Image: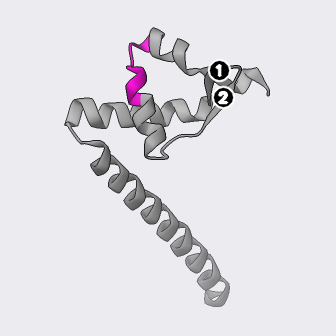
Amino acid sequence: MDSENYIQIELYCERTQTPVEFIDDLLEFDMIEVQQIENKKYVQQHHIIEIERIYRLRNELGINMEGIDTINHMLEKVNRLEQELKLLRDRLTIYEH
């Protein structure tokens, strides 16, 4: 494991004052992936942005985990549709010239 790309969850929670139970909720809803090494959990650095985004949704907007899960699925679908639209537009430009 390349430790430069991973952050220990316990240390992250301690430094950011994020409850460890919140991370457990994220794991329960499969919103992040965690690596467990020697009884310690680690998260990849790119998941930190997602953790912080979800934490703000829950604490600042009062959205429960089920609502956040639904929002995440909707955002994933919108992103897929945007990619498909871009691909189709790119194909159409071939025929316009």
Instruction: Work out which residue is located at the far left of the displayed protein and give it.
Output: 62
Q: Quadrant of the C terminus?
A: bottom right
Depicted 21 relative to depicted 75: above or below: above
Indicate whether residue 49 is drawn in magenta.
no
Q: Horizontal placement of 54 versus 45: left or right? A: left
Q: Hey, what amino acid is under mark 1?
A: Asn
Residue behind mark 2: 36
Determine whether the residue tagged by mark 2 lies in a helix, strand or loop: strand
Between 15 and 36, the one nearer to me in the picture: 36
The residue positioned 20% from the left and 36% from the top of the image is 62
Expressed as whole percent of the image width and height from the top left, the position of residue 90 reads 62, 76
Expressed as whole percent of the image width and height from the top left, the position of residue 37 reads 71, 24
Expressed as whole percent of the image width and height from the top left, the position of residue 44 reads 63, 31
Residue behind mark 1: 39
Depicted 41 relative to depicted 57: above or below: above
Quarter-of-image position of residue 94:
bottom right
Indicate whether residue 18 is drawn in magenta.
yes
Mark 2, other Cα within 10 Å: few <14 / some 14–19 / many ≥20? few
Q: Quadrant of the N terminus?
A: top right
Instruction: Work out which residue is located at the far top of the displayed protein and give it.
Output: 15
Determine whether the residue tagged by mark 1 lies in a helix, strand or loop: loop
Q: Horizontal placement of 79 versus 46: left or right? A: left
Cα gap from disc 2 to disc 1, whole angstroms: 6 Å
Instruction: Work out which residue is located at the far bottom of the displayed protein and give it.
Output: 95
Q: Horizontal placement of 70 versus 60: left or right? A: right
The residue positioned 25% from the left and 42% from the top of the image is 64
Task: Mark 2 and mark 1 in contact? Answer it, CB < 8 Å.
Answer: yes
The residue positioned 58% from the left and 40% from the top of the image is 33
Q: How is the image coloured?
A: one colour
Q: Hey, what amino acid is under mark 2?
A: Gln
The magenta segment is 16-22
Residue 66, which numbered label? none
